[in-house]
Image (spheres, rainbow, N blue to C red):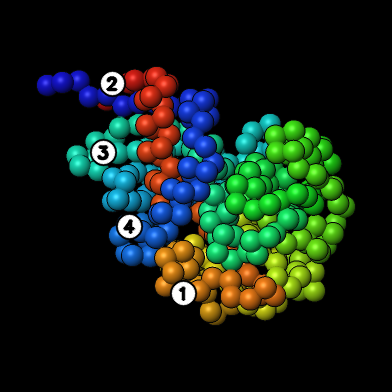
């Protein structure tokens, strides 16, 4: 019998594969169309919680159109920064959809960052004003950067208003955004200053089960779009309930997560982002609409991106072949 092998892709390998953000956005957008058509399989993420506000989640999914099947085993530990460790880490096990045999094990850190930013950009494409130029970013870590990276692919961004509780983090973020994207960055000292006057608002702090939200309804302007990638950690319930359109990437998963004690202030009417992408229901309809897509992060996002990384790695000869 022929020896079976898997390809191991370290974080450096995944990064060196260098899948362009535009390709990731396109793959995630297509995934949402497939999801809306009922041509995907994804149970709600399950997990264990070894510390307060920390998680280790198992996220399986199958995307038949691209033959992509697998599981992401991902953790998020807010206190890791104090140890010099990343908040988010994990692995993706990617399988052959025909035989079920594993084809690759790849680091999930880069993929998680990029696909989350891509999901924000897809939501904004349908829910934000197309002339959006100013983005407020609250939380200047990995997601604060990757969301701007993705948004600038679709919008004429010219200025970022950056807020973070850590001065060193926001300093490094400012330098990187200016250097990599040639965007003006205004460092602001309060969440209010980051939100007011922004066409797009991204909140990217840690996920908190019992948050102390600060963003008030009056701060969030007419015509603005928000992407809270940290769930409702920053947003007061009255804001969530007063926006004209409140969306999520998976209503079933949001309701499951709510049953675990999250999302106490979300509205009763929740739109499915995939239905908007697929044209089943309208996205933005007026210039003055205030819209929000609280994406939870889907295993389907990862399965949309994993084959792109795998194919690029093979083309470039990256990774280590290991016997099963």
Please provide percent x and percent y for residue 172: 78, 35
Q: Is residue 108 visible?
A: yes
Q: In the current view of this chain or complex, which residue is farthest to the right? A: 189
Residue drawn at the location 51% of the way across and 31% of the way down: 18
Q: Mark 1 points at which residue?
A: 281
Q: Is mark 3 on a helix, strand or loop?
A: strand
Q: Which of marks 4 and 1 precedes in the sequence? A: 4
The numbered disc on residue 323 is 2
SS at mark 4? Answer: loop
| Residue depicted at x 76% and y 66% | 215
Residue bearing mark 3: 96
State the quadrant of the C terminus: top left
Q: Where is residue 166 in the image (x, y as percent from the top left)?
A: 81, 43
| Depth order, front residue of 119/203 | 119
Q: Disc 2 versus disc 3: distance between alpha carbons?
A: 16 Å
Cα separation between marks 3 and 4 = 16 Å
* Image height of 106 relative to 288, above or below: above
Q: Is residue 125 left or right of residue 95?
A: right
Residue at which label 4 appears: 40
């Amino acid at each position: 019998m022929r020896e079976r092998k898997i390809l191991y892709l370290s974080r450096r390998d995944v990064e060196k594969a260098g899948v362009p953000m535009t390709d990731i956005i396109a793959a995630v957008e297509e995934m949402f169309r497939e999801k809306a058509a009922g041509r995907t399989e994804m149970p709600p993420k399950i997990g264990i919680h070894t510390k307060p506000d920390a998680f280790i989640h198992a996220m399986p999914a199958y995307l038949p159109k691209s033959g992509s099947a697998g599981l992401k085993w991902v953790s998020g530990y807010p206190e890791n920064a104090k140890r010099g460790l990343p908040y988010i880490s994990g692995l993706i096990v990617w399988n052959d959809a025909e035989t079920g045999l594993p084809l690759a094990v790849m680091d999930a850190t880069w993929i998680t960052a990029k696909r989350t930013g891509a999901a924000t950009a897809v939501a904004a494409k349908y829910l934000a004003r197309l002339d959006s130029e100013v983005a407020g970013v609250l939380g200047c870590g990995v997601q604060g950067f990757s969301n701007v990276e993705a948004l600038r692919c679709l919008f004429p961004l010219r200025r970022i208003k950056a807020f973070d509780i850590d001065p060193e983090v926001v300093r490094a973020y400012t330098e990187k955004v200016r250097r990599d994207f040639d965007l003006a960055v205004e460092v602001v000292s309060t969440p209010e200053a980051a939100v007011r006057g922004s066409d797009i608002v991204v909140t990217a702090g840690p996920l908190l089960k019992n948050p102390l939200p600060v963003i008030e309804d009056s701060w969030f302007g007419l015509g603005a779009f928000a992407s809270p990638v940290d769930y409702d950690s920053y947003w007061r319930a009255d804001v969530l309930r007063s926006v004209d359109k409140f969306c999520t990437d998976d209503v079933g998963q949001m309701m499951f997560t709510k049953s675990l004690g999250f999302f106490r202030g979300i509205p009763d009417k929740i739109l499915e982002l995939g239905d908007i992408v697929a044209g089943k229901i309208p996205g933005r309809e007026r210039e003055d609409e205030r819209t929000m897509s609280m994406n939870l992060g889907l295993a389907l996002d990862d399965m949309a991106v994993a084959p792109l990384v795998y194919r690029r790695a093979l083309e470039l000869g990256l990774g280590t072949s290991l016997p099963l």
